[in-house]
Image (cartoon, rainbow, N blue to C red):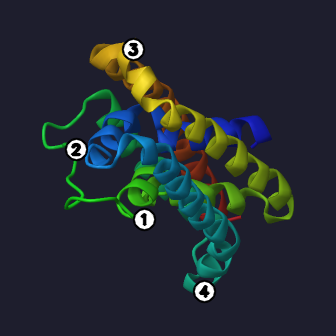
Amino acid sequence: MTLFSAIVLLLLVIDPIGNIPFFLTALKEVAPQRRKRVIVRELLLALLALVLFLFAGPSVLRLLQISEPSLTLAGGIILFLIAIRMVFPAAERTHEPTGGGEPFLVPLAIPYVAGPSALSAVLFIMSRDAARWPEWLLAIIVAWLITGITLVAANSLSKVLGEKGLIAIERLMGMILVTIAIQMTMTGASQFIALNLPQ
């Protein structure tokens, strides 16, 4: 995996374009002059969660004795399910209410940005080559910056692209993620078979 492919994978999984409607709904009760501050704060909390998972994840895998082929195969299946939901949005996927007031940590930072799929992707990337952690950290930061710029400009982008434009972009990202997920699944399966075939 290259630095560029890691950045693309993280962006596809975090899905900043798809998160625009959710952010706008969650922030509708927040004063307009505070919205950007709230978004920046939540993005920083999400970044902290992603970075912590980057370094703590491998220890968890070793503790649970999960092999790399198993992680790759599971990651491919998870990403495929996420991609299918992006291409064919479920009817029950709604803008979840935050309970009123200003959201903190939930749901903007977690799970909208640093959700289970993003954390799984970070864990998968780190498992490829833990010695390249500076590259993976840079990938997280670059993907986070692009996500941040997108979400800070959410209101303007929503007006420019419109609902149909946002849906079209999300489905295109879902199609790309499908191909990545299938490749990961095939790689994990081939590694597993190679390790378990009698010599």
* Position in image of residue 34 (x %, y %): 44, 48
Q: Are marks 4 and 3 in contact (CB under 8 Å)?
A: no
Q: Nearer the viewer, mark 4 or mark 3?
A: 3
Type of amino acid at the residue the image marks with label 3: Leu
Please report the residue visible at 71 percent of the width from the left and 64 percent of the height from the top. Answer: 199
Dot 4 or dot 3: first in sequence order is 4
Quadrant location of residue 154? top left
Report if residue 20 is visible in the image. yes
Front position in the image: 95 or 153: 153
Density class for disc 4 (Cα within 10 Å; few <14, some 14-19, many ≥20) is few
In 3D space, how far apart are the residues under numbered discs 2 and 4 (Cα atoms)? 37 Å
- Disc 2 designates what residue? 95
In 3D space, how far apart are the residues under numbered discs 1 and 3 (Cα atoms)? 27 Å
Q: Is residue 33 above or below residue 171?
A: below
Type of amino acid at the residue the image marks with label 1: Leu
- Disc 1 designates what residue? 105
Q: Are marks 1 and 4 in contact (CB under 8 Å)?
A: no
